[in-house]
Amino acid sequence: MRLAEIEADLAKLPLVSRKRVLYGEVDKMNFAYGSHYLTWFEQGRNEYLRLCGLPYTAVEARGLALPVVEAHVWYVAPVHYDDLLDIRCAITACSKTSATFLFSIEKDGERVAAGSTRHACLDAARKPVHVPDWLQQQALARYDISLDPA
Amino acid sequence: MRLAEIEADLAKLPLVSRKRVLYGEVDKMNFAYGSHYLTWFEQGRNEYLRLCGLPYTAVEARGLALPVVEAHVWYVAPVHYDDLLDIRCAITACSKTSATFLFSIEKDGERVAAGSTRHACLDAARKPVHVPDWLQQQALARYDISLDPA
Amino acid sequence: MRLAEIEADLAKLPLVSRKRVLYGEVDKMNFAYGSHYLTWFEQGRNEYLRLCGLPYTAVEARGLALPVVEAHVWYVAPVHYDDLLDIRCAITACSKTSATFLFSIEKDGERVAAGSTRHACLDAARKPVHVPDWLQQQALARYDISLDPA
Amino acid sequence: MRLAEIEADLAKLPLVSRKRVLYGEVDKMNFAYGSHYLTWFEQGRNEYLRLCGLPYTAVEARGLALPVVEAHVWYVAPVHYDDLLDIRCAITACSKTSATFLFSIEKDGERVAAGSTRHACLDAARKPVHVPDWLQQQALARYDISLDPA
């Protein structure tokens, strides 16, 4: 997957959360360290599902888990200490066996990072199961939700 | 508790693990960020208990958990990217309700940090219980163990 | 320092930030892992200084740094995945050589953690200097500021 | 890039470091949390470059930096608390503008994760420059190095 191929999808993602970059998240170049973006993606997933009316705690309460099986990050422009970031996220694809979230991180309206995470679906015994219909119906490609602008 | 009060105890702690400081662990001053020291303390606790013949997985297998209830860190001298640290640790005190680990972090034989963590004891139902005798007998104040020097 | 000794000070701390606990911040007991509290304290320090009209980026722009020299955390009650936490913080003491921040973390109005961090003051050459008067005047014991309630 | 496409390259990667999974690195399913793999990849990059005779501190001493511009992780099998992981890594490709590291994480000889990170090259003024010849000559596709087996 190349960044250009998902550009149209990224442009549609709703704003779901914000993040202030901490001192402990930048390295000695004052660039945000790469691993934190995956944590910010989780923050986006969490808030996207909540805005869809399906918080992840409710997914777990139904006996399901969505462990990540693949992640991809593009670091587009540097992110610095104390930057205030917009996190955009949606589920953009569901197959029988996995759901894919897409992410765009922006600073002052400019993209600074993008990425995707693909998740399997496990039941309470941690056996792989099909992605349930209710998850697709409630949370697939919801571009109509959005956090209030700051 | 003041650092001077525990100096004599710190000087006795056995070497239990080593840690190479990562790029993602230093901030933009090239100082290791404060929260990581608590993670390095956990690494020390883990390896101390293993060297005592009582790995924490064995503690959990007996149905116990030792959640931290208090932590104290003294940042004595700066720690930088790629520094190789010695982690020294022992359980230095046990009361009926908690066990205290002491830590010394050293670089080239000089202390760069010290600290303590105090842990309660929970049973499988996560109810507080007394620190068991076998834990005290096996792991209290064992200064005779040590990692092989590098 | 014992928790009871700082109880009166903790009760006065202003609300300065909020934090939603992420999946990656809890351990296999579904307890927030101890090191993250120091990161949440930093979030509190950052927002306290901003509310005082003195964001830490402005402190750095004046050529100063405030590295942590001592930290203390009391883990009062478990914190779980997806909990929404209130972070309360203020500078409660300044000596010539260090400034001390106090923290209270609350969930639904109940304290779940408390702590303190003490910071030295370094100039641009990273030499220790006295805590400047303007920092004390602008940011010491400001209990009159507060984040808007949710 | 699909995992199958890089299988042959992954199989050649030298063992460069080891990692014991900490309590703070697993989530409430006792699965290692996704962001930590990028930190473990950094540990692998660091030790690969050191084994090539070119520690990253030496790269920086020459006025260069190698910020990550793209990262990809495949989570192949669960990783649990206290697992001891083998980290395999090499630079497998260099273009004029970026260098790509490949990673394989193994537990008891079985792959549990794989991934890649692509890095730009910046000079001391943080302007993009070509990947220098000496880096390619010293560190490209060195499969002849290896950490001593445990």
Image (spheres, coloured by chain):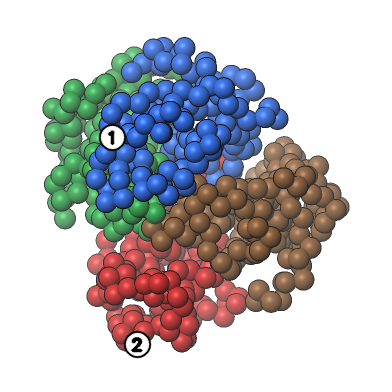
Chain colours: A red, B blue, C green, D brown
- On what subunit does the disc labeled 1 rest? B
Q: Are marks 1 and 2 on the same chain?
A: no
Q: Could you tell whether A133 is left or right of A26 in the image?
A: left
The Cα–Cα distance between marks 1 and 2, rounded to whole angstroms, is: 48 Å
Q: Disc 2 residue type?
A: Asp
What residue do we see at 52% from left, 49% from top? D82
What residue do we see at 28% from left, 29% from top? B96
Residue B119 lies, in percent from the top left, at: 34, 35
**Most foreground residue, D6 or C49:** D6
Mark number, residue C98: none
The N terminus of chain A is located in which quarter? bottom right
Q: Which residue is mark 2?
A: A133
Residue A45 lies, in percent from the top left, at: 38, 68
Residue B95 lies, in percent from the top left, at: 30, 26
Q: Disc 1 residue type?
A: His
The C terminus of chain A is located in which quarter? bottom left
What residue do we see at 69% from left, 77% from top? D4
Q: Which residue is mark 1?
A: B130
**Most foreground residue, D7 or B62:** B62
Q: Could you tell whether A45 is left or right of D46 in the image?
A: left
Q: Nearer the viewer, mark 1 or mark 2?
A: 1
Label 2 secondary element: helix
What residue do we see at 63% from left, 30% from top? B147
Does the residue at mark 1 contact the one at mark 2 (Cβ under 8 Å)? no
Instruction: Note whether D51 is above or below C24 in the view shown.
Output: above
Q: Is residue A108 shown to the viewer in this render?
A: no
Label 1 secondary element: loop
Q: Label 2: few (<14), some or many (≥20) within 10 Å?
A: few
